[in-house]
Amino acid sequence: MKTAVITGASRGTGYACALKLAGMGYNIAVNCHKNSCLLDKLEEETRKYNIKCIKHTGDIGIFENAASFFGIIEKEAGVPDVLINNAGVSYIGLLQDMSPGEWDYVLRTNLSSVFNCSKLVIPLMLKRKSGKIINISSVWGCTGASAEVAYSASKGGINAFTMALAKELAPSNIQVNAIACGIIDTDMNKSFSKEELDAIKEEIPACRIGTPGDVAALVCQLAESGSYLTGQVIKLDGGWI
């Protein structure tokens, strides 16, 4: 039975990915920063699939926490087949008003967590000479967004990280890809008013905002994709950007 690791799995896209992968027969190892009760709910929802659900709570932007998580995974499930780096936070505001602590938090959560988890999973995947690393990014990492400089920088970092690491790991049959999401209907975008969301919808050729299920569907396709698909940053935005 295959095992998928999903960070930021207590809600939104991470939760949807975990549910869909569990439904495909994957054991899941899930992490969140604080909301352990939501991981308990996820575990309850996945019981019907007769798979193993390994739960961990902690800030994986801190290397020691990520190492603890992967130690548990290796002990309980062996070598992960798929890593989905999904943990992320946003910050909306002018850069001049952002504190150094806020900058560090966004970069640690969004980018350092990708480094930490990838660094820890690579030696395990090398043992099997196979694996998939899927990074959840954003279209703002491709183009930048006003009033979201730190978020854009972190996602741009993920995009470059993805392309570089894919080249490094391709000879070992480990594929690395990223999904650059457009606006997705998650708590991260609850700060937008209905009027603002309606205005954004008018700009999107697909005439709608994306769903966590849209992201989960593409994640599962990448998890099962062939070995020649690697180093790609795939926009999932309804044709928006």
Image (cartoon, rainbow, N blue to C red):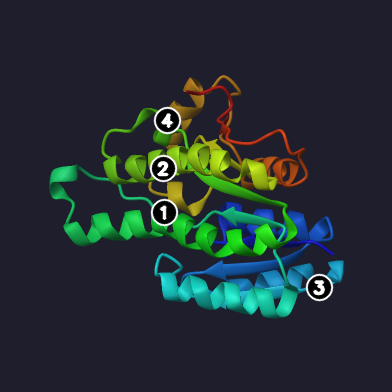
Image disc number at residue 155? 2
- 33 is higher (above) or lower (below) than 213: below
The residue tagged 1 is 110
The residue tagged 3 is 47
> Residue shown at 72%/52% (left/top)?
130
Q: Residues within 10 Å of mark 1 (few under 14, many from 20)?
A: many
Alpha-carbon distance for marks 1 and 4? 15 Å
Residue type at mark 1?
Answer: Asn
Question: Which quadrant holds residue 19?
Answer: bottom right
> Residue shown at 60%/47% (left/top)?
134
Residue 76's x, y, as percent?
72, 79
Secondary structure at badge 3 equals: helix
Q: Residues within 10 Å of mark 4 (few under 14, many from 20)?
A: some
Q: Are marks 2 and 1 in contact (CB under 8 Å)?
A: yes
Mark yes or no: residue 185 visible: no
Q: Viewed as shown, does residue 52 lie left or right of 112?
A: right
- 151 is higher (above) or lower (below) than 99: above
The residue tagged 4 is 142
Secondary structure at badge 1 equals: helix
Alpha-carbon distance for marks 2 and 1? 7 Å
Residue type at mark 3?
Answer: Arg
Which mark sits nearer the N-terminus, 2 or 1? 1
Alpha-carbon distance for marks 4 and 3? 38 Å
Residue type at mark 2?
Answer: Lys
Secondary structure at badge 2 equals: helix
Alpha-carbon distance for marks 3 and 2? 34 Å
Secondary structure at badge 4 equals: helix
Which mark sits nearer the N-terminus, 1 or 3? 3
Q: Nearer the viewer, mark 4 or mark 3?
A: 4
Residue 193's x, y, as percent?
40, 41
Q: Viewed as shown, does residue 179 lie left or right of 43?
A: left
